[in-house]
Amino acid sequence: MKKWILISAAMLSIQLGKARAEDNVLSPADVADGYSLLFDGTLASFKSNWVDYVKGNATNTNLDSKWILDATCHCITMGIGNAPDIRSVKTYKDFELRMNFRIDNNQGIFYRSLLTGDRAWQTGVEYAINNVTNLGKDNPGSAYDLYAPDPITYQLFTTNKWNSVRIVVKGDSVEHWMNEKKVVGYKYHSPAFWEAYNVSKWNAENRLTNKVVGDRNSGYIEEGYLGLQGDHGGKWIIKDLKITTAHPCFGPINTDGSSCGTTAIGNAAVGPKVAFISSLRQAAGTLTATFSDKTVQRASLIGLNGKVMSRASLSEGGRKAYFAELPKTGLYLLRLDLASGSVTQKLNIL
């Protein structure tokens, strides 16, 4: 008979894979999470969502001709010398952005940018994209010149493999994900943020993430444009570009690509102190877990490789979870998703 031992309660980040059937389309999970496409595989859709970045011009509708459609892969390609940086038509406050890319040079993605600077990078933090991995705080996935990515998961252009981007911004907290691994997490205006800021290029300019130039106490920029850099040249190929403002979600995603429901990142926020387990009972190849706090919306058993092994049936308003399918012996994670966040505990099957 298998025995279940509760080891400890802790917030963990577990990578869950994402399956795709087609490019530039929304899956059922995407639709449920409120995603919309910022590029559907046609140049017309790209032009309707992106325009050239022009200082002080919020009504610009022009998109430079160097941003073109590659019909062979239904991708947007920036690959004819240097191109102007471009921005989203809309501004975004809290959001989750995803895309896939290949690149042979150095560009970036900006977020919460204003139009007050000559360039988008003067007000928006940059998710760096680079075809090298020895540049520290300019490595692919970094918050440019602020935080280096850890781990490095970028796949070089020469491998002919796509890289995935996921940027989650909610309130004062941010996560960068690359190839389904969290590589950066930070909190605007935290002590760690200012420590990184004070040794970066932004220290002299003193306007990154600030509403008023020269006034650090004016606060981080709460809403702004997305931006795609083009001025460094090289070939940049983009597809699967989509965004949601309905359910931006910190932490790993589920195997079907849906949001995970967590509300905390590393040292940027405190995890929910809810839904601890009051009892575990195993019998005849099944497991029943009873929770002594708040309503659980979903309970999952997850392998250390991030794969969901079993999902529970819930009863008693979410206070009890019943697992009818148990994995083999070994170490697993029991993840509880709630409206207020997610809690993960280790379980050892003996």
Image (tube, helix red, strand yellow):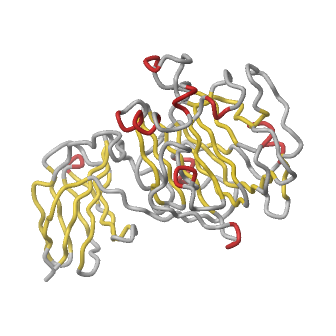
Instruction: Report the quarter where the C terminus lies.
Output: bottom left
Identify the residue shown where x is 23% and y is 81%.
Answer: 329
Q: Residue 215 in the image: state x and y as whole percent.
A: 49, 16
Identify the residue shown where x is 55% and y is 53%.
Answer: 141
User: Dividing the picture into quarters, in which one does residue 37 lie?
Assistant: top right
The image shows residue 320, relative to residue 119, as above or below, that is: below
Q: Residue 188 in the image: state x and y as whole percent.
A: 43, 33
Instruction: Report the quarter where the N terminus lies.
Output: bottom left
Identify the residue shown where x is 70% and y is 34%.
Answer: 88
Identify the residue shown where x is 84% and y is 64%.
Answer: 72
User: What is the total number of numbered labels drawn onto the structure image?
Assistant: 0
The image shows residue 48, relative to residue 336, as above or below, that is: above
Q: Residue 239 in the image: state x and y as whole percent.
A: 71, 55
Q: Is residue 335 left or right of residue 285?
A: right
User: Dividing the picture into quarters, in which one does residue 311 lie?
Assistant: bottom left
Q: Is residue 107 left or right of residue 283?
A: right
Residue 133 or 95: which is nearer the viewer?
A: 133
Q: Is residue 120 left or right of residue 272?
A: right
Q: Residue 87 in the image: state x and y as whole percent.
A: 71, 35
Q: Is residue 290 left or right of residue 41?
A: left
The image shows residue 304, relative to residue 57, as above or below, that is: below
